[in-house]
Image (tube, rainbow, N blue to C red):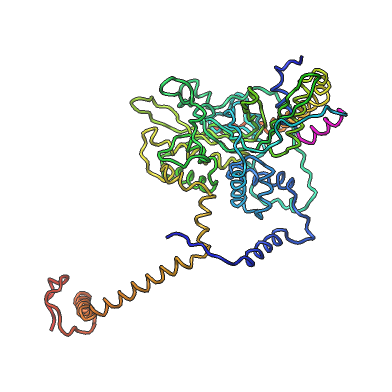
């Protein structure tokens, strides 16, 4: 049943907004949050909002967080709404994560790697104990530094790739002329409706903007057995990559920014098939900002969604493309769930009338069959008295043809 | 005539500069040639793309904001167009990047702008990058695998 619009309520709505603004500001004696404070001291919240809002603009994300009173899904919604007001100028060249300026790089599959492993800033090996020193202000935390040899840091999976032990990731070739995938052919969720079955490009774009909580739970479900997942974190890297565009009016490529990305390469087992020898396969996660939990979950779900490609049986929700891709977007999901708050008076009135009518019919048909029902009820009582030997009242006229009591002779 | 092979480099430097820093360096140049807009600063989006697995199929990762602008200055009888493409929504930054790009193509200005704007910006970016590398290097980790059954 569709939603019927309502009118009125303008004053209450205006006051509700004013109240929100006042409560959001809080006590006047407490200094107001600046966008720079949010950007720097709530950096991971900003990163989540640019990732799920699918718009890399940390200033706007900080503003959205302030405006949404700290509600990050609402903030992502604000970014999505804002982006629709801007024209699309360019598509970037695919970012080269192999050239990333690393802030963090770890692998759970090799101890010694070219380029080494750097924990960067991470919660991983820190006790989850509340630090009461932080409750006080004016803390100083100097960052440790040490000498750097600045050697190149190849991707870990490329090391496996050299031996052919892992499924290769190559650019798509055009079937007719062998040219690489043309720009127009890349699926764009902001311009095209989601289609099923979806290509990997559509899936990865969908997952990159998906809700972190949804991806996390799906990834977890696949590890617990709802899907075939035996992953290793091949490599996790966080750092800056250059965004390069090639404006037609300029005629050459130019870098417009360095943006922070998190990249995760999951390595999964694969038994092989008649066509492919046993090898590792992979799942890929790439997000805006420092979003490690999400990027890992994305990589697990990406691999799960490749079940068909590798001839695996689809057993769990995480492998079900339609289920995952249709429910991953939190802007869509919160909209549909929360629209239930809006007045549905007309819809409900219709349902109410229907239920009343059904009840009336029910009662009428009940009255009509009442005498028959009395007989059945008596028969049931009679049965239980016989089977369990309870002292229930003896039926007046036991039916002779009761279907469930063929072996019992009626007691007088 | 100015050698334009380095143009992508200085344009990238201007785009990635802190807007306040760029403005400060530009202010030290004194009076600049008048410029007109061939394209007024305008905000828009760039769709950032990635590759599956880092090397495979291209996909759309998400958008970023971008401001672009084209200015024109006069160099004698010639006219020079300068282009500015900067991430974010800062019209002043885009205009100043475009103006510097134009000045860098101007034979009389090239050296001054290179020395007073581009090089300091590059040095500052390099310093920041080195600091980040040193901080990351301090977290270099070597895990040992315990031998079992002993």
Q: Residue A197's spot in the image, x, y percent?
A: 40, 38
Which quadrant holds the N terminus of chain A? Answer: bottom left
On screen, residue A116 above or below A286: above
- Number of callouts: 0
Is A256 in front, or is A304? A256
Is A318 in front, or is B78? B78
Q: Residue A246's spot in the image, x, y percent?
A: 62, 26
Task: Judge whether residue B20 is colored magenta.
Answer: yes
Q: Residue A180's spot in the image, x, y percent?
A: 49, 23
On screen, residue A80 above or below B91: below
Horizontal relation, residue A250 to residue A338: left or right: right
Q: Residue, x 54% and y 50% (percent of image)?
A: A331
* Magenta range: B18-29
Q: Is residue A179 visible?
A: yes
Horizontal relation, residue B5 to residue B56: left or right: right
On screen, residue B62 above or below B78: below
């Amino acid at each position: 049943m569709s939603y019927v619009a309502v009118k009125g309520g303008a004053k209450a709505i205006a006051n509700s907004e004013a109240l929100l603004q006042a409560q959001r500001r809080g006590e006047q004696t407490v200094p107001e949050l600046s966008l720079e404070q949010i950007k720097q001291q709530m950096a991971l919240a900003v990163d989540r909002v640019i990732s799920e809002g699918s718009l890399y603009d940390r200033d706007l994300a900080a503003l959205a967080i302030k405006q949404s009173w700290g509600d990050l899904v609402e903030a992502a919604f604000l970014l999505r709404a804002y982006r629709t007001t801007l024209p699309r100028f360019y598509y970037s060249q695919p970012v080269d994560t192999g050239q990333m300026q690393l802030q963090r790089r770890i692998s759970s599959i090799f101890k010694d790697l070219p380029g080494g492993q750097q924990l960067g800033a991470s919660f991983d090996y820190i006790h989850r104990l509340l630090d009461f020193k932080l409750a006080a202000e004016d803390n100083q935390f100097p960052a440790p530094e040490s000498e750097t040899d600045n050697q190149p840091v190849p991707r870990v999976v490329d090391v496996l790739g050299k031996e052919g032990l892992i499924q290769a990731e190559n650019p798509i070739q055009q079937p007719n002329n062998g040219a690489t995938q043309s720009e127009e052919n890349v699926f764009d969720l902001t311009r095209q409706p989601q289609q099923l079955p979806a290509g990997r490009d559509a899936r990865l774009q969908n997952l990159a903007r998906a809700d972190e909580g949804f991806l996390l739970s799906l990834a977890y479900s696949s590890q617990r057995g709802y899907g075939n997942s035996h992953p290793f974190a091949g490599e996790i890297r966080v750092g800056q990559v250059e965004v390069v565009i090639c404006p037609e009016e300029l005629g050459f490529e130019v870098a417009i920014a360095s943006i922070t990305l998190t990249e995760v390469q999951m390595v999964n087992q694969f038994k092989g098939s008649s066509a492919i020898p046993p090898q590792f396969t992979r799942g890929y996660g790439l997000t805006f900002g420092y979003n490690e939990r999400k990027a890992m979950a994305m990589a697990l779900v990406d691999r799960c969604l490749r079940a068909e490609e590798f001839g695996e049986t689809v057993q769990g929700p995480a492998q079900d493309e339609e289920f995952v891709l249709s429910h991953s977007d939190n802007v869509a999901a919160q909209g549909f769930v929360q629209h239930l708050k809006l007045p549905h008076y007309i819809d409900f009135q219709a349902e109410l009338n229907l239920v009343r009518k059904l009840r009336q019919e029910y009662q009428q048909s009940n009255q009509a069959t009442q005498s028959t029902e009395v007989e059945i009820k008596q028969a049931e009582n009679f049965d239980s008295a016989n089977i369990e030997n309870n002292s229930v009242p003896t039926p007046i006229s036991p039916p002779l043809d009761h279907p469930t009591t063929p072996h019992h002779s009626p007691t007088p | 005539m100015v050698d334009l092979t380095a143009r992508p480099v200085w344009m990238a430097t201007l785009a990635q500069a802190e807007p306040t820093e760029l403005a400060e360096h530009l202010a030290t140049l004194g009076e600049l040639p008048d410029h007109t807009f061939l394209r007024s600063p305008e905000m828009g989006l760039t769709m950032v793309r990635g590759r599956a697995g880092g090397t495979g199929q291209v996909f759309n990762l998400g958008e970023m904001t971008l401001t672009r602008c084209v200015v024109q200055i006069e160099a004698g009888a010639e006219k020079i167009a300068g282009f500015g493409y900067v991430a974010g929504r800062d019209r002043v930054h885009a205009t100043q990047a475009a103006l510097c790009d134009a000045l860098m193509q101007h034979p009389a200005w090239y050296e001054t702008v290179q020395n007073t704007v581009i090089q300091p910006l590059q040095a500052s970016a390099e310093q920041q990058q080195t600091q980040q590398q040193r901080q990351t290097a301090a977290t270099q980790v070597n895990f040992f695998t315990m031998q079992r059954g002993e």
